[in-house]
Structures are given as structure tokens and as C-alpha cells.
Amino acid sequence: MDNITITRRDFIKTCGTVAGATIIGLNFAFIPCAYASETSYKSHMNERINGVYAADGKFGIRASQDNLQVQALYENWLGDVGGHKAHELLHMRFRDKSENVKRLGIQAVNPRASEFESLTYPYEE
């Protein structure tokens, strides 16, 4: 029987390839694959929306202008509400993406919209 000669570099490359293939194979074996469909996408989004609203409902202060941390931020660093520094740091450019959403055929639904219809904020009075 002939001896096989292999360099150290080839041995390390081969071991790395085998280890990588094993890890990838195990990941595919134990993690169920998700196949995206319209129904699974919508159910996932509804679960996400409900989770966000449930987490939001746990906060006692729900309006940012009533939050003491936001008030302290303006007093100590940003200055006036609507001032130049606040505008430069907090505002972003708006791009209307409603046409793209319409093209997808997805209608955004806020399951808790009725809870917020009667609420008014101080700046709306």
C-alpha cells in the first residue's frame, strides 16, 4: 500500500472544508426551513404587530412629549422643541412609499386603531 503525502496546508484546507460542510448540514437538519407564502407572511406580520402593540401597552407613558427622559433631552441638549439643533438631529427625509405598498397588494391593518381614536395629545387641543 502506498503512502499518501499531503502538505500541512492541504490538510488544514480539507479539515476546514469538511468542518464547514458539517456545520452547514447540521444547521439545515435541525432548523426548519421557512417557505414564504402570502398567508405565512401576513400571519407573521400580524403576530409582529400584535407583539409590538402588546409591548407598547405595558408602558405607562405612551406619548413622547410626556416622557421625562425626552423632556430632559430637550432641556439639557436639544434646546427648543422644533429648534434648529433638534431639527437637524431628529428629522429625516420623507419618501412616499405608498405606491410601492399598493403595488404589493398589502393593506396595513392596525388592530388597535379604535383605542387611539378618542385620545388627543396636548398639541392637538
Image: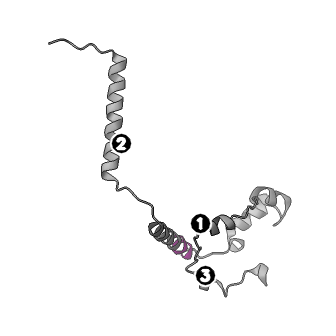
Along the polypeptide, which appears first: circle 2 or circle 3?
A: 2
Rendered image quadrant of residue 59: bottom right
Placement of the C terminus among the 4 image quadrants: bottom right
Q: Secondary structure at mark 3?
A: helix
Along the polypeptide, which appears first: circle 1 or circle 2?
A: 2
Which residue lies at the image location 71% right of the left edge and 84% below the top edge?
120
Look at the numbered discs 2 and 3 and tell me whether their residues touch, using CB distance below 8 Å: no
Left or right: 93 in relation to 63: right
- What segment is highlighted magenta in the picture? 52-57
Does residue 102 sit above or below 17 in this rendering?
below
Does residue 43 sit above or below 32 in this rendering?
below
Q: Nearer the viewer, mark 1 or mark 2?
A: 1
Callout 1 amino acid = Leu
Q: Nearer the viewer, mark 3 or mark 1?
A: 1
Left or right: 119 in relation to 79: left
- Label 3 packing within 10 angstroms: few (<14), some (14-19), many (20+): few
